Amino acid sequence: MWVRSTLAYRTSFALMTFGNFAASGLDFVAIWLMFSRVHALGGFTLPEVAFLYGTSSLALGLADLLVGSLDRLGARIRDGTLDVLLLRPAPVYAQIAADRFALRRLGRTSQGLLVLLWAIGHLDVAWTAGRILMVPLMAVCGTAIFGAVYTAGAAFQFWAQDAAELQNSLTYGGNTLLQYPPTVFARDLVRGVTFVIPLAFVNWLPALWVLGRPYPLQLPLWTAFLGPVVAALMVAGAALAWRHGVRAYRSTGS
């Protein structure tokens, strides 16, 4: 329904999609301008940083397209409109994820994909079958990991009722973090996004394996292939948090 509504005004849809594309692209413009003054950032060249940027932006863009509407859950809890969704014979999660589905978010996804394709074409890497397969695997696992963060943040709102900004700090903030090499950050921060909230498995660990670079924490080489396992565990944990949150919901009390 929301897709048909959006496409009913094609010019407006095209302009909004382009605006989303351009707004997200400003992040890469900043990186490009930075490299007009330096030859490397944390030891990484522009194509290598673009590879990190593209993989992270593509994963977040897909997750945002699919479940980004979950950040509206807090407002529904506060005004009691979540009760309407609970009465319908359809999963509440699917209804909230589809609520005001914004097809214009394809702008962010396509922008990240274009940067990724440019980076792949300019990297000085021997593209073996394993490296080629790792790129789409990163996109799938990264989407699942960001989706799990969206879901866990939404589940937390059943108790906090207004935690959208905390959720955004982990999704959009995490995306910004992953766009840059881990070598430019303090080791404690790198440990945090590796072992506490494992966003590093979105692209840092597998991407550094593709690029042939060591991880700052000197982890074993096989950890680069743990993306599917980490994604599955995070999705399972987020699903349990969501289920517990729905069961704990007590409406507005009015």
Image (cartoon, rainbow, N blue to C red):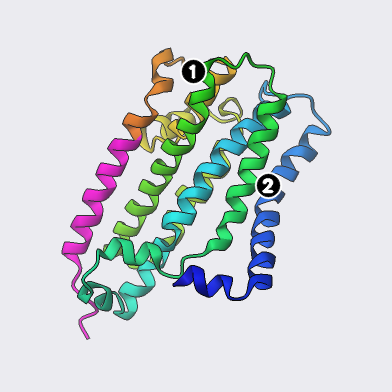
- Outermost residue on the bottom side: it is 254
- Magenta stretch, main secondary structure class: helix
Q: Could you say where residue 242 lies in the image, as x and y percent from the top left?
A: 25, 55
Left or right of 23 in this view: 84: left
Q: Amino acid at mark 1?
A: Gly
Q: Amino acid at mark 2?
A: Asp
Q: Residue at x 32, y 51 (%)?
A: 152
Mark 2, residues whose alpha carbon is within 10 Å: few (<14), some, or many (≥20)?
Answer: few
Q: CA distance from mark 2 to mark 1?
A: 29 Å
- Quarter of the image holding residue 95? bottom left
The reply to whether callout 2 and callout 1 are in contact (CB within 8 Å) is no
Count of marks, rendered view = 2
Numbered mark located on residue 130 in the image: 1
Q: Mark 2 or 1 closer to N-term?
A: 2
Q: Can residue 179 be seen from the camera position used here?
A: no
Give the magenta part as a residue range: 231-254
Left or right of 66 in this view: 237: left
Q: Could you say where residue 141 lies in the image, as x and y percent from the top left?
A: 41, 36
Q: Residue at x 44, y 72 (%)?
A: 1
Q: Residue at x 74, y 44 (%)?
A: 30
* Residue receiving disc 2: 27
Q: Can residue 108 be seen from the camera position used here?
A: yes
